[in-house]
Amino acid sequence: MSMRQVVIAGAGKVGRSIAAELLENGSEVLIIERDPQKIRTDALPEARWLLADACELSQLDAAGLNECTVLVAATGDDKVNLVVSLLAKTEFGVPRVVARVNHPKNEWLFTESWGVDVAVSAPRLLTALVEEAVSVGDLVRLMRFRQGDASLVELTLAEDSPVVGQRIGEIALPPDSALVVILRDGRAVIPSPDAALEHGDEVLAVATSSEAEEQLAALLGPVPGRARTLTTGG
């Protein structure tokens, strides 16, 4: 297997959609599915398919999981996703384990203790995006990364934000934060020192502490200290 090998457990709509995106981006993908009726090689002929139970240690071993870079537990069963994640991390040392959370009430289980590096909850993500759409000027946490305390946060600049019109190089960002990208009129703007911020810009940043989140909210928002976060990463 190459260093870009990704193993996806679960060949439902979610698993196939992820596989299609990864294949288009040049990754090698192995899809593991235990239901023969979900094996659709014609839909994704570029992927490798394996009819197996991803909860069985011997079958994961036969799939060569110890050589993959990323495992995605994408089944519709949270119990299965947790077991697959734990086996992948503890038995095979997979560097990156991403797990799908089907029911928000189970989010608390999807932690490093179960081998999960990143937990993705579609309901929580949708909630965050809806809240973000109606909360200009509020800081919204979109995802918490499992490795460390870093979070991906977003804030849409209000008209009265003090940083509107300023060049990024002139803004004193919190030491534990970094701007990732600026979304403006449907396009991505690289946050270079000479780039100026505008009203309506969606600023995405990484903050490595809760203090940095609060400082970003105070710096970018119209009201200092006004921060509301919605976690999507568990």
Image: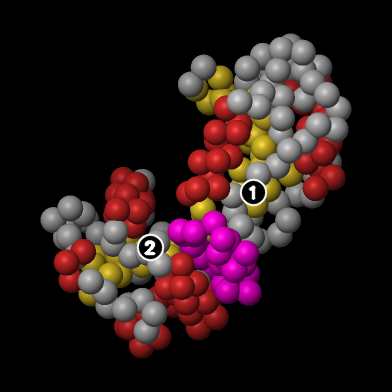
Q: Percent from the top left, x then y, of residue 130?
A: 55, 33
Is 152 placed left or right of 9 in the picture? Answer: right
**Magenta extent:** 95-117
Displayed quadrant of residue 156:
top right
**Would you name the residue on which mark 1 appears?**
231
Q: Quadrant of the N terminus?
A: bottom left
Q: Is residue 96 magenta?
A: yes
Single out the residue that lies furthest toward the front: 105
Q: Secondary structure at mark 2?
A: loop
Image point 51% across, 17% down: which residue? 185
Classify mark 2: residues with Cα within 10 Å, few (<14), some (14-19) or many (20+).
some
The residue under the point 84% across, 45% down is: 211
| Residue type, numbered disc 1 | Thr
For badge 2, the amino acid type reads: Gly
Figure quadrant of the C terminus? bottom right
Residue to which mark 2 is pinned? 76
Res. 25 mark: none
Q: Residue at position x 27%, y 78% from top?
A: 52
Residue 7 in picture, x, y percent from top left: 37, 66
Q: Secondary structure at mark 1?
A: loop
The answer to whether residue 26 shows anywhere in this view is no
